[in-house]
Amino acid sequence: MNTISPAELKEAAQQLPSSPRIFGKLNKLLRDPSTDLTDITELVNADSALTASVLRLSNSALYSLGTPVDTLDEAINRVGFRELFKLVGLAASKQLFAEHNRVYDISGAQLWENSLTCGIAMEILARKLGLDDQEAYTIGLLRNLGKMVLDYCVKDDPQYPSYNTVSNLPLIDWEQNNFGITNPTVAGFILTSWHFTEETAQTIQHQYTPNQAQRHFPHIHLLNLSNGIAERIGNGLRGESNYWSNWEEHLPRTGLSSTEFDESLQEIKSSVDRVIANF
């Protein structure tokens, strides 16, 4: 096993699209009461592909009112800052998970739909609990970031390892054996280096094993539940189902009842299906 170094992880992360970092900066801007429209448009317009995706979504059946919008200013006037944040998250995650991931043998579409489901589930559940649903949405969308970074680290190696689902090793044990590090740890490290909040980085880092987190952030157990929801509605990822099997144990730590959890499933599935149909 050749352990991947922090320097290699950072170098690989630099090869990813810039849109996830823009998404994180937008999260901060929208929490600053001094932020104005110019701040928002300058940030998003720094990535022309991201801007084009946001405008296309603004003109889709999700938001269209009949009159097309041609600029971010017009899009913001139509949907508002809150919905713009969601649109940027959708477009950023779509860019991030555009390519087939060879290490995990997962298509970009599978990764994006899983991340999208987790983001929407986190947002809906957090809102029910009175938690920060903007932070929750961000956490869900970026929960697979570490998988992309690990894939970039070894993409030029013809002998790169590929996760074999018939292996007896759980996913994160397989990662530790092959890379000396796991995908949630990589995600936490990269998000911290990109100046995301500690809660975002720590929640994603402990999504598989929330009981091992040194600090109890409100969203940690919620992310484990959201991953289980993605599995339930057909958007799970190979090798992960065993990490979400004890979902009932996490309910008391979130404040959700079993009834509230079950009632949320259809709402989440309907929201996911609607976004996918209009993207």
Image: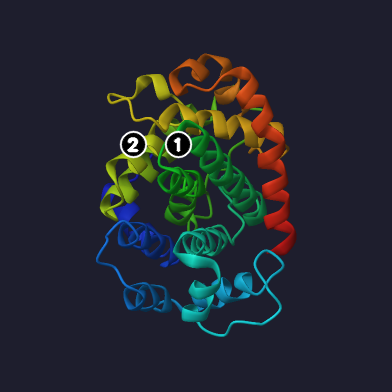
State how far apart marks 2 and 1 are (Cα): 23 Å
Disc 2 residue crowd, few under 14, some 14–19, many 20+, Cα 10 Å:
many
Is any part of residue 78 visible from this angle?
yes
Q: Residue 176, how many percent across, how many down? A: 42, 32
The residue that mark 2 highlights is 202
Pick the residue in front: 167 or 119.
Answer: 119
**Residue type at numbered disc 1:** Asn
Classify the position of the C terminus by image quarter: bottom right
The residue that mark 1 highlights is 178
Pick the residue in front: 84 or 202.
Answer: 84
Image: 260 above or below 23: above
Pick the residue in front: 129 or 200.
Answer: 129
Horizontal side of 166 relative to 55 (left or right) equals right
The residue at the point 50 percent across, 19 percent down is: 250
Secondary structure beneath label 2: helix
Classify the position of the N terminus by image quarter: top left
- State which quadrant residue 243 falls in: top right
The residue at the point 61 percent across, 26 percent down is: 261
Disc 1 residue crowd, few under 14, some 14–19, many 20+, Cα 10 Å:
some
